[in-house]
């Protein structure tokens, strides 16, 4: 058996006939479509319409739309390719079926010699553990194909009624081995082992919940032999140690296997080691379509997953995997995978889910009502704001224009408060000429910065020394000073070429020069830009 087990592959034992048929049927439909397009006529009217609509929807040109219903050379090549593919798949299916049949016949002819070497008192018991340790376990961890091959090979040995091969004893050894393997395998090995267990457990579940199938597959075969020494509560007689296991006893054994696997998986999920939890989740996700089948054990797994799904879990990938498996497990429960759930438990769960759904609906309605209230409040506030703005705009349009002169006077610190009041009493409204003159007078004043303040102070001090303050401050006084200095310069020419007097002895000419320099330094804002160069 060791030699034959490692000689063959999954393709030697199993022919995916359904997959072949589905693909051949799809290719034949394509061949029929292209054949109708080639022949044309009434049968191709619907096809032409769909092709024209497809070409028009794709934004094709008039030529592309016109050629969409034409049978081109590319269509002819595609038709030939489809025909060749369908023929090749049909030939390959027949060849594969013949090959699997020949391998099965060869194994059937050699089945009597597979476990003939295991003789002795405990030979029947040791055959399962020896076959698992030397053949099944090392190969099922290699790849997905090898895991599928191991499950198919075990089923084939059971169907052939191989002498010395006890299926139930082998399954019992597998369940015991999985409990220890969970803590010592890698992620890839866990995935392969999960596929092997999923295929094996599917067969066991069918036997558990279908008594007719169990009797058909197990009655009178060597696979149904069970060693009573494996049962702790069973009394062992010296005369009869092994016997064929009836379906009622098989249910108890199945429940024991189920509880053992759940205990092992829960231990992995509660472990503080990262790899233990991850391998347990990988195996459970592989078996979710057929395991667990008992509601109590399924609820136990769900409760164990709750701490792993919390946001405070530092292992984020474990949290995501736990959430994904929890969703898959709930879906499997709703689909009827939990076959041993009582009607009472089903009703209680339905009522509980209905209550939770009603609470979620009420919570959503309450949130929607609060949102509507907030929206109305915000709309009301915005409406009041716009009404106030509209009223302010209407009042500004109907109100008289503001008194800019008074505002500018209030901003100018050089104007005394009494002067502002007197200007206000005289009437400084912009509509009157007096108010405009006052506004222009104030607006033309230079800003009172440090430089202008120093110039004004120097001018006042010089005016005090010369004794011509009143004349120097007015245009009349400046003209008189300028004329007096001109006459004196005309009577005494030497005096005109004399340097400027010292500080405190200023004359009218020096005052005029200062005025001219100041005008050059501070040009009037009403003048245009100064031109350079000759005219």
Image (cartoon, helix red, strand yellow):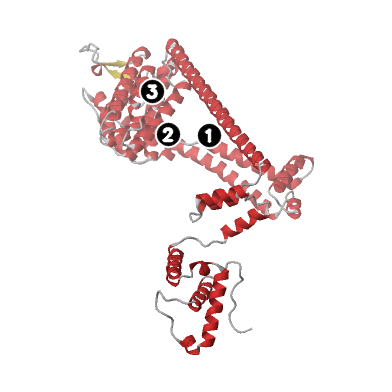
Q: In which quadrant of the rendered view does residue 230 lie?
A: top left
**Separation of marks 1 and 3 at Cα, in angstroms:** 28 Å
Identify the residue at image location x=46%, y=19%.
Answer: 356
Q: Secondary structure at mark 2?
A: helix
Looking at the rendering, in which quadrant would you find the N terminus? top left
Identify the residue at image location x=36%, y=41%.
Answer: 143
Q: Secondary structure at mark 3?
A: loop
Horizontal placement of 340 versus 485: left or right?
left
Q: In which quadrant of the rendered view does residue 7 lie?
A: top left
Q: Are marks 3 and 2 in contact (CB under 8 Å)?
A: no
Marks 1 and 2, the one that precedes in the sequence:
1
Q: Secondary structure at mark 1?
A: helix
Depth order, front residue of 65/394 = 394
153 above or below 54?
A: above
Name the residue carrying label 1: 18
Q: Which mark is residue 292?
A: 3
**Separation of marks 3 and 2 at Cα, in angstroms:** 36 Å
**Separation of marks 1 and 2 at Cα, in angstroms:** 22 Å
Looking at the rendering, in which quadrant would you find the C terminus? bottom right
Name the residue carrying label 2: 105
Q: Position of residue 124 (x, y in %)?
A: 26, 24
Identify the residue at image location x=56%, y=36%.
Answer: 21
């Amino acid at each position: 058996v060791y030699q034959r087990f490692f000689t063959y592959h999954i393709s030697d034992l199993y022919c995916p006939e359904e997959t072949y048929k589905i693909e051949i049927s799809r290719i034949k439909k394509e061949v029929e479509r292209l054949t109708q397009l080639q022949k044309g006529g009434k049968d191709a009217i619907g096809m032409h319409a769909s092709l024209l609509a497809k070409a028009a929807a794709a934004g094709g040109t008039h030529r592309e739309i016109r050629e969409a219903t034409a049978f081109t050379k590319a269509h002819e090549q595609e038709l030939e390719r489809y025909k060749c593919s369908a023929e090749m798949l049909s030939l390959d299916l027949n060849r594969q079926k013949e090959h699997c049949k020949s391998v099965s016949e060869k194994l059937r002819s050699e089945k009597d010699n597979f476990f003939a070497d295991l003789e002795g008192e405990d030979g029947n018991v040791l055959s399962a553990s020896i076959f698992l340790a030397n053949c099944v376990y090392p190969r099922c961890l290699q790849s997905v194909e090898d895991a599928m091959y191991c499950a198919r090979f075990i089923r084939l040995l059971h169907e052939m009624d191989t002498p010395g091969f006890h299926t139930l004893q082998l399954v019992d050894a597998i369940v015991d081995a999985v409990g220890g393997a969970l803590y010592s395998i890698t992620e890839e090995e866990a995935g392969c082992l999960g596929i092997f267990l999923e295929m094996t457990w599917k067969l066991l579940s069918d036997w558990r919940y279908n008594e007719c199938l169990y009797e058909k597959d197990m009655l009178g075969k060597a696979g149904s032999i069970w060693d009573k020494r494996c049962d702790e509560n069973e009394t062992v007689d010296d005369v009869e140690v092994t016997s064929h296991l009836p379906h009622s006893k098989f249910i108890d054994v199945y429940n024991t296997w189920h509880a053992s696997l759940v205990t092992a998986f829960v231990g992995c999920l509660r472990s503080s080691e990262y790899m233990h939890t991850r391998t347990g989740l990988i195996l459970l996700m592989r078996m979710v379509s057929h395991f667990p089948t008992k509601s109590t054990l399924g609820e136990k797994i769900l409760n164990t997953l709750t701490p792993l799904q919390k946001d405070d879990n530092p292992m984020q990938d474990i949290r995501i995997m736990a959430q994904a498996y929890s969703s898959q497990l709930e879906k499997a429960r709703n689909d009827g995978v939990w076959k041993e759930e009582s009607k009472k438990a089903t009703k209680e769960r339905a009522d509980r889910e209905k209550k939770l759904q009603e609470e979620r609906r009420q919570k959503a309605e309450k949130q929607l009502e609060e949102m509507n209230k907030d929206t109305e409040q915000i709309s009301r506030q915005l409406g009041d704001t716009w009404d106030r703005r509209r009223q302010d705009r209407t009042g500004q349009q109907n109100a008289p224009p503001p008194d800019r002169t008074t505002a500018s006077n209030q901003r100018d610190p050089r104007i005394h408060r009494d002067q502002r009041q007197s200007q206000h009493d005289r009437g400084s409204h912009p509509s009157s000429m007096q108010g405009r003159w006052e506004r222009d007078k104030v607006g033309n004043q230079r800003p009172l910065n440090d430089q202008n303040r120093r110039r004004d102070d120097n001018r006042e001090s010089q005016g005090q020394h010369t004794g011509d303050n009143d004349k120097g401050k007015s245009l009349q006084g400046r003209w008189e000073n300028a004329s007096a200095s001109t006459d004196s310069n005309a009577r005494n020419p030497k005096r005109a070429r004399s340097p400027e007097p010292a500080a405190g002895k200023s004359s009218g000419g020096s005052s005029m020069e200062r005025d001219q320099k100041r005008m050059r330094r501070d040009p009037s804002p009403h003048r245009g830009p100064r031109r350079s160069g000759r005219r």
